[in-house]
Image: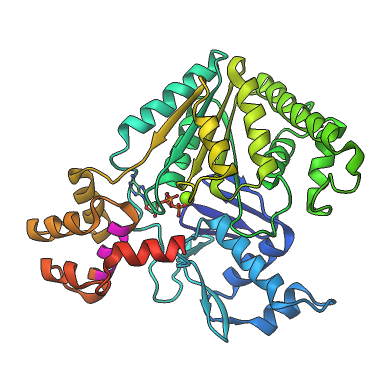
Amino acid sequence: MIYRFDEFELDDRAGELRREGVEVRMAPKPLALLTLLVRERDRVVGRREIFARLWPDVAVTDASLSKAVAAVRRALDDRERRVVRTFPRRGHRFCAAVVEGGTVTVGPTVPTIDPERTRLLGRGDEVRLMNGFLADALTGRGRLVMIDGGAGIGKTRLLQEAAKGARSQGIVPLSAWCWDTNTAPTCWPWVQLIRGYMERFKGRDAQPPPAVRRLLCAEREPDPFTANHASETEDRVRLLDATAQYLKAASHRQPLLLVLDDLQWADDLSLRVLQVVARVLEDAPLVVACAHRDPPSPGEKHTRIAGLRGLPQARRCSLSGLSRSATRECAEAVAGRTLPSAVDEAIWRRTQGHPLEIYEVVRALRDLGTWSAPAVRSVGGPRGAEGQIRGRLEG
Ligand SMILES: Nc1ncnc2c1ncn2[C@@H]1O[C@H](COP(=O)(O)OP(=O)(O)OP(=O)(O)O)[C@@H](O)[C@H]1O
Ligand SMILES: [Mg+2]
């Protein structure tokens, strides 16, 4: 059976989740969890039932389930937790509208993200810059793009647009995310990218050299270097070089866009790999596009990211709020109606073009069923949507 929701397709026979036709790689347990929740979407699936179905023969802790839920949300880009919802002390429910073999079976009351997700608005300059870099890469001049901005400003959305632009130019996008937990294996984003490449190009010289293969075992071996301190430095140098050369050679076979999101959570080794890859891409058909929230405070990570931005082949792309007109367009698209000027003005004052805040304010108005300027000012409580949303995302 194929289940379609938002821009995704879940093919339970093939055991595959696809986003706009491209496979989203998932570990077996999160994929099994997603499949279970989608099939049982007319109800909340209890934690005990999930344990019994996913881990029938082993006793696992709540942490395993939380990890699997987090992985599903990451795969669906469900940062606002609107698709996979948690019902405290009860369980989880899949809450997007699903099309199943041509029949629309709507989930519960919660609207999905997609019907109200607008086309990308107000980022013409950034998209042009990105497409220009992709075109440069096709002539063998690789680039590094460093996107930054606050939570919810649209970094991930811009990366998704870059991936679309890449596909349209015959460049294969591969994506990876850094996790906001310290449970992620060492160098996890690069492991994801290399695995993605190997899966996509099976049999086409995709096999990495031994030093890189060692990295791919990182899931089982949290730090592949601690085992042998004597050769640690040498190992690391070999690994950095081998990874960069492997990806460079891969891009010569097939131009690539490597996307690394949420770099603020990258481990140190991942940033070092990035530094080396950035140095070798200058004469390769390879674009690396990274996004990070502004690193919180000066420190090693801050210095590494600043150093990357300063490279001659790098371009920084700082995102701020949408323009006044794009804000209006976004609000009206989410509202699904034209808005009175006073409401539009109030939304602009309230959000200053911050996309996630526009979504939140408009949803709140829709839930209230009121489209007035005072309602815009009242939604979200005294701290206002901005503070609440940023607090929630950054806290
Ligand atoms: N230019 C835009 N036009 C329309 N919608 C947008 C735009 N930018 C962002 N959005 C929407 O706003 C929401 C937040 O965007 P996004 O997830 O890309 O933010 P982010 O900067 O990656 O946040 P975080 O730091 O939390 O990862 C998403 O629903 C996204 O689709
Ligand atoms: Mg993001």
- Main SS, magenta region, reads helix
- Across and down, in percent, residue 347 comes to 19, 58
* One can see residue 256 in this view: yes
Q: Which residues are magenta?
A: 357-364
**287 within the magenta span:** no
The residue sitting at the front extreme is 298
Considering depth in this image, is 271 or 12 the residue closer to the camera?
271
Q: Nearer the viewer, residue 223 or 376?
A: 223
User: Residue 239's image quarter?
Assistant: top right
Q: Is residue 29 left or right of residue 210?
A: left
Residue at far bottom of view: 89
Residue sitting at x 40%, y 60%: 113
Task: Identify the residue shown where x is 72% and y is 21%.
Answer: 249
Q: Is residue 385 above or below residue 290?
A: below
Left or right: residue 185 compared with residue 338: right
**Is 368 situated left or right of 223 in this image?**
left
Q: Is residue 1 visible?
A: no
x and y percentages locating residue 155 in the rendered image: 43, 44
Q: How far across and how far down the image is residue 141, in percent?
A: 55, 15
Across and down, in percent, residue 44 comes to 55, 81
Q: Nearer the viewer, residue 55 or 354?
A: 354
